């Protein structure tokens, strides 16, 4: 049953706080987080605001057409909100106890799986108590999905936090179709093999009918893990388990390019971009980094390259770097260490090179609304994406989407999924500081004609392969009977 083509036959939810009756949703999204953030109104009442992100805008049309529901964590350790309706969507808010927050979220998700799947940039920790919490929380998400799904529904599970959900759902519901998409890299077998629960994770994922990865290399790594950990035979992109076939392939995620470009074109946003350049004292070149403050993003190498370029006077005197580092996972050890490292590097550069009133690095440890982000993208001559490992990196695509006048240049790490698609970027190995420095200089001194040629190429890709295209191609493949899959 296609969630894309059928009209909703379940009754629409009543306005108010109640979601639809359980078991009547033909499309169920299961993700770590809800697409809304809890805020408190002036009288202390709970309000839900849409959280920024392309995923919800991509899935919204499918959610509406197929009486969809979104199951996710509310983001705090209070009681589970349960089913409710907000922004015209049926939602089920899951809860985490303080112990689950520590052992499942901060522990197994973000101090075991996250570093392991990002090529052990930080050492992963393996604790049996954290694993137990991961199993328990995955089970509660699976139970919620089973309760919400109509007969023959489509269930789409997202990301590394929920890898056991596909199999847990399948054990209870043979009638449903299950997709899984991994938003982060899937590591090579030698790294994945470190995980004491590698077999359980592979089995958990194999409960799905279709597994989506960002890059072909991630899908290949997963197929190898199936052979090595579970002794399963693979053929092309399929794995056979008994009488079932599971497919693993690349579906590179993207952004809602059109709506972001519309924001960038707004008069108010263009004016704000001008104000930002003015506030920076009208430099000749604005370099920009926008990242979650995460050790995978390569912020220290970027700062090192920039500091050396200033010392060597290779960028001219009137250059600034604006580095937005959105706070993230602040209580996890490796993130605290990183914050200190980044802030020390920023103050060293500013200490050595600033003049009164004009520091060469503007460091902003804050999050911003989409309009301000778009204004920053417009204000920047060169975007720096220097991740050591990154599933996709949507910031690179957002920059491209905002540059509607086809100006600007992108310096992009080879170790991002985006590097497979954005051939107009200056590709860099972020471990090679000299190569990175050369690329920054080339991007900062690019001729307008060359910038236009490169940007046009990237804009074509991002506008043709947007997030709606991603969702359609994943769900379209999931809905096909095995044997009729297109070559991926
Ligand atoms: C990455 C992951 C997401 C995650 C996000 C923010 O993009 O792929 O699944 O939600 O980071 O991390 P957080 O720990 O705040 O959910």
Image (cartoon, rainbow, N blue to C red):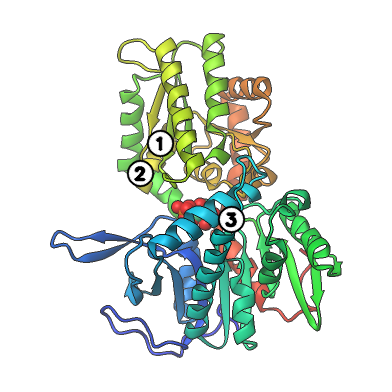
Mark 1 or mark 3, which is nearer the start of the sequence? 3
Q: Of helix, strand and loop, which one carries label 1?
A: helix
Q: Mark 2 against mark 3, which lies toward the viewer?
A: 3
Q: Quadrant of the C terminus?
A: bottom right
Q: Is the CB of mark 2 within 8 Å of ligand 1? A: no
Residue 182, quarter of picture: bottom right
Mark 3 or mark 2, which is nearer the start of the sequence? 3
Identify the residue at image location x=32%, y=24%. 278
Q: Nearer the viewer, residue 81 or 25?
A: 81
Q: Of helix, strand and loop, which one carries label 3?
A: loop
Residue position for label 1: 376
Q: Mark 3 against mark 1, which lies toward the viewer?
A: 3
Q: Quadrant of the N terminus?
A: bottom right
Residue 326, quarter of picture: top left
On the image, the x and y values in percent for residue 133 come to: 52, 65
Vertical position of residue 349 compared to residue 217: above or below:
above
Residue position for label 3: 127
**Residue 147 visible in image:** yes
Q: Is the CB of mark 1 within 8 Å of ligand 1? A: no
Q: Of helix, strand and loop, which one carries label 2?
A: loop
Identify the residue at image location x=34%, y=84%. 13
Circles 1, 2 touching at the beta carbon (< 8 Å): yes
Residue 244, quarter of picture: bottom right
Q: Nearer the viewer, residue 327 or 380?
A: 327
Identify the residue at image location x=67%, y=74%. 208
Circles 3, 1 touching at the beta carbon (< 8 Å): no
On the image, the x and y values in percent for residue 263 come to: 39, 48
Identify the residue at image location x=46%, y=88%. 24
Residue position for label 2: 368
């Amino acid at each position: 049953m296609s969630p894309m083509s059928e009209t909703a036959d379940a009754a629409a939810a009543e306005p108010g706080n109640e979601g639809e009756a359980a078991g009547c949703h033909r499309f169920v999204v299961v993700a770590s987080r809800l697409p809304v953030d809890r805020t408190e109104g002036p009288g202390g009442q709970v309000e839900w605001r849409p959280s920024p992100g392309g995923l919800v805008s991509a899935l919204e049309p499918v959610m509406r057409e197929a009486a969809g529901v979104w199951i996710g964590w509310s983001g705090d350790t209070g009681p589970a909100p349960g089913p409710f309706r907000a922004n015209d969507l049926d939602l089920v808010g899951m809860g985490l106890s303080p112990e689950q927050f520590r052992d499942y979220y901060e522990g197994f998700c973000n101090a075991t799986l996250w570093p392991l799947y990002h090529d052990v940039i930080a050492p992963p920790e393996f604790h049996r108590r954290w694993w137990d919490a991961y199993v328990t929380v995955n089970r509660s998400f699976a139970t919620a999905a089973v309760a919400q799904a109509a007969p023959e529904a489509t269930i789409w599970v997202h990301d590394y936090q929920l890898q056991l959900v596909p199999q847990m759902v399948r054990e209870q519901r043979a009638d449903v179709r299950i997709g899984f998409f991994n938003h982060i890299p899937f590591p090579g077998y030698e790294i994945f093999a470190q995980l004491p629960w590698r077999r359980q994770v592979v089995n958990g994922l194999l409960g799905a009918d279709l597994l989506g990865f960002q890059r072909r290399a991630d899908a290949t790594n997963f197929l190898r893990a199936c052979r090595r950990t579970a002794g399963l035979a693979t053929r092309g992109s399929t794995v056979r388990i008994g009488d079932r076939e599971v497919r693993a392939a690349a579906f590179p995620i993207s952004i809602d390019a059109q709506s972001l470009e519309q924001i960038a074109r707004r008069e108010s946003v263009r004016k704000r971009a001008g104000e930002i350049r003015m506030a920076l004292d009208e430099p000749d070149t604005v370099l920009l980094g926008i990242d979650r403050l995460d050790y995978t993003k390569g912020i220290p190498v970027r700062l090192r390259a920039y500091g050396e370029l200033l010392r060597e006077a290779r960028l001219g005197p009137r250059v600034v770097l604006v580095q937005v580092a959105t706070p993230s996972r602040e209580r996890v050890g490796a993130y605290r260490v990183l914050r200190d490292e980044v802030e020390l590097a920023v103050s060293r550069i500013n200490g050595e090179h600033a003049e009164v009133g004009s520091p060469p690095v503007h460091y902003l440890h804050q999050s911003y609304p989409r309009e301000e982000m778009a204004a920053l993208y417009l204000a920047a001559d060169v975007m720096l994406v220097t991740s050591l490992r990154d599933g996709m990196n949507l910031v690179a695509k957002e920059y491209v989407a905002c540059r509607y006048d086809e100006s600007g240049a992108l310096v992009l790490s080879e170790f991002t999924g985006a590097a497979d698609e954005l051939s107009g970027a200056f590709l860099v190995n972020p471990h090679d500081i000299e190569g990175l420095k050369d690329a920054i200089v080339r991007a900062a001194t690019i001729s307008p004609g060359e910038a236009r040629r490169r940007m046009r190429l990237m804009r074509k890709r991002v506008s043709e392969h947007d997030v709606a295209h991603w969702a359609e191609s994943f769900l379209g493949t999931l809905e096909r009977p095995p044997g009729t899959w297109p070559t991926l």
